[in-house]
């Protein structure tokens, strides 16, 4: 008879439930969901018989230490800034940890202590990062084993609405934090292109977007995602003249997003008149007037001022952006503002009002790796790996499933003794990623590979 294992699940956000559901299938796992607010934990645990719920403030070292010590493994799905704190508690208790987040410098510093404690701290095992690593490394290692070289590596991933549900001017809906999506628009990007190191400032990120061909049915564009430059070393592809990891969006998104950037909507400095405590209702035209420093709050005058902020000279694209501005209602005297303190946050609130998934709508995950290969005999070929997955209407989103399920699989493999590498690790070697990949297809997660 299998020994029962205890799992502490920190966080009850949208990726937690697919992870929880997967781990309950074994019948041998006792799971506790922990959130700062007990009712949030109870909301998730109530869906699954036998799952416990507790209130836990992870910033209380005493409470966190006790909760981690009481379980065999902790899954941390809380903000990445708290992962190092969780790992420190796990080191004290000599218990394992799993996260879906990138390994931060603060986490990396704990590698030696984790190894000394004999614990596994598995990270980067969601979608991006996670599934992207698995299928990229599979092909990279195959090419190397066959005596070939990777001369170019491009990887683009997007969480998007399914085409039939991309029915707004941005072609986008939120399956996670609107604030996180908007803040990502200001990130710098760094990558290798044709042997040259390219650095894109956040203000120019949307200008760098270019068409990315995946399937003819999808009009997708892509732009760099933070710093890809070190992946030549991390993936051991030193001959790659191009090395970029990026974000996919539908055509038209970058131009519209750049207009919002140019207007100043990514400003997260506190504004007194936008504070929740400020008196009276506030109409959107007054906010946009203040943001633009314009003399008039007249919608037509504001639209003219916004037109001057549109970079593209393509007439059809300009028309679509103005249509999108009207659709947002940000020049309207009749649309009230949800006061959130900053220009960024009031825009987030407005976008969330308009761009959440509705009943019977579904999201889509699209991930493409593209490799240029110099084969052992000197011939050239192109290899692609594409993961395409749709969410279930009124069920798990594709985003939630492709983050939560790999996390659950990795957790179960650690509990079963099939992943044993100690320290602060990511799925970068076959002994770690292959067991995970073996189980993904049965969950509807796979990649279609092609050699051109």
Image (cartoon, grey):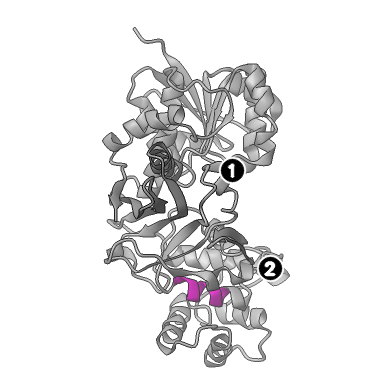
Q: Quadrant of residue 272?
A: bottom right
Q: Nearer the viewer, residue 283 or 66?
A: 66
Q: Main secondary structure of the magenta part?
A: helix
> Which percent across, then down, holds residue 286?
61, 81
Secondary structure type for disc 2: loop
> Which percent across, then down, holds residue 342?
65, 66
Q: Nearer the viewer, residue 323 or 411?
A: 411
Magenta stretch holds residue 256:
yes
Quick one: label 1 or label 2, which is nearer the N terminus?
1
Q: Which mark is residue 79?
A: 1
Magenta stretch holds residue 254:
yes
Q: Is residue 197 left or right of residue 169?
A: right
- Label 1 crowd bin: few (<14), some (14–19), many (20+), radius 10 Å: few
Question: Is 98 drawn above or below residue 50 in the view shown?
Answer: below
Residue holding disc 2? 278
> Which percent across, then down, holds residue 164?
27, 65
Look at 66% across and 80% down and name the residue there. 290
Q: Which range of residues does the magenta coloring cover?
A: 253-260
Of all residues, the one furthest to the front in this rendering is: 377
Query: Distance of mark 1 from mark 2, alpha carbons?
Result: 30 Å
Q: Quadrant of residue 186?
A: bottom right
């Amino acid at each position: 008879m299998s020994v029962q294992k205890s799992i502490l699940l920190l966080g009850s956000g949208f990726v937690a439930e697919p992870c929880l559901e997967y781990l309950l299938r074994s019948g041998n796992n006792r799971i506790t969901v922990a959130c700062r607010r007990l009712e949030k934990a109870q909301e998730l645990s109530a869906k699954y018989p036998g799952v416990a719920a507790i209130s836990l403030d992870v910033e209380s070292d005493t409470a966190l230490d006790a909760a981690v010590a009481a379980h065999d493994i902790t899954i941390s799905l809380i903000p990445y800034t708290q992962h190092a704190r969780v790992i420190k508690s796990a080191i004290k208790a000599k218990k394992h940890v799993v996260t879906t987040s990138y390994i931060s410098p603060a986490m990396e510093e704990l590698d030696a202590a984790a190894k000394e404690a004999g614990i596994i701290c598995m990270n980067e095992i969601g979608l991006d990062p996670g599934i992207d690593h698995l299928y990229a490394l599979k092909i990279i290692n195959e090419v190397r084993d066959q005596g070939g070289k990777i001369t170019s590596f491009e990887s683009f991933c997007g969480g998007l609405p399914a085409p039939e549900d991309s029915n707004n001017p941005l072609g986008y809906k939120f399956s996670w934090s609107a604030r996180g999506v908007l803040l990502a628009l200001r990130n710098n990007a760094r990558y290798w292109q044709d042997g040259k190191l390219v650095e894109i400032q956040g203000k120019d990120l949307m200008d760098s977007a270019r068409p990315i061909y995946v399937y003819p049915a999808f009009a997708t564009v892509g732009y760099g995602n933070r710093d890809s430059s070190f992946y030549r070393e991390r993936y051991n592809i030193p001959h790659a003249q191009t090395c970029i990891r990026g974000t996919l969006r539908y055509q038209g998104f970058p131009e519209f997003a750049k207009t919002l950037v140019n207007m100043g909507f990514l400003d997260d400095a506190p504004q007194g008149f936008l504070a929740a405590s400020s008196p009276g209702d506030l109409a959107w035209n007054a906010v946009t007037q203040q943001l633009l420093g314009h003399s008039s709050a007249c919608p037509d005058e504001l639209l003219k001022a916004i037109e001057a902020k549109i970079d593209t000279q393509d007439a059809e694209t300009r028309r679509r952006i103005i249509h999108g501005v009207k659709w947002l209602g940000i020049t309207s005297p009749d649309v009230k503002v949800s006061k959130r303190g900053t220009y960024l946050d009031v825009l987030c609130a407005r976008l969330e009002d308009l761009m959440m998934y509705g009943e019977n709508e579904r999201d889509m995950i699209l991930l493409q790796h593209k490799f240029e290969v110099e084969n052992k005999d000197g011939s050239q070929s192109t290899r692609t790996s594409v993961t395409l997955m749709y969410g279930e209407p009124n069920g798990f989103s594709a985003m939630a499933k492709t983050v939560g399920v790999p996390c659950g699989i990795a957790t179960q493999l650690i509990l079963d003794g099939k992943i044993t590498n100690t320290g602060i690790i990511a799925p970068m070697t076959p002994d770690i990623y292959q067991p995970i990949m073996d189980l993904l297809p049965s969950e509807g997660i796979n990649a279609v590979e092609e050699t051109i």
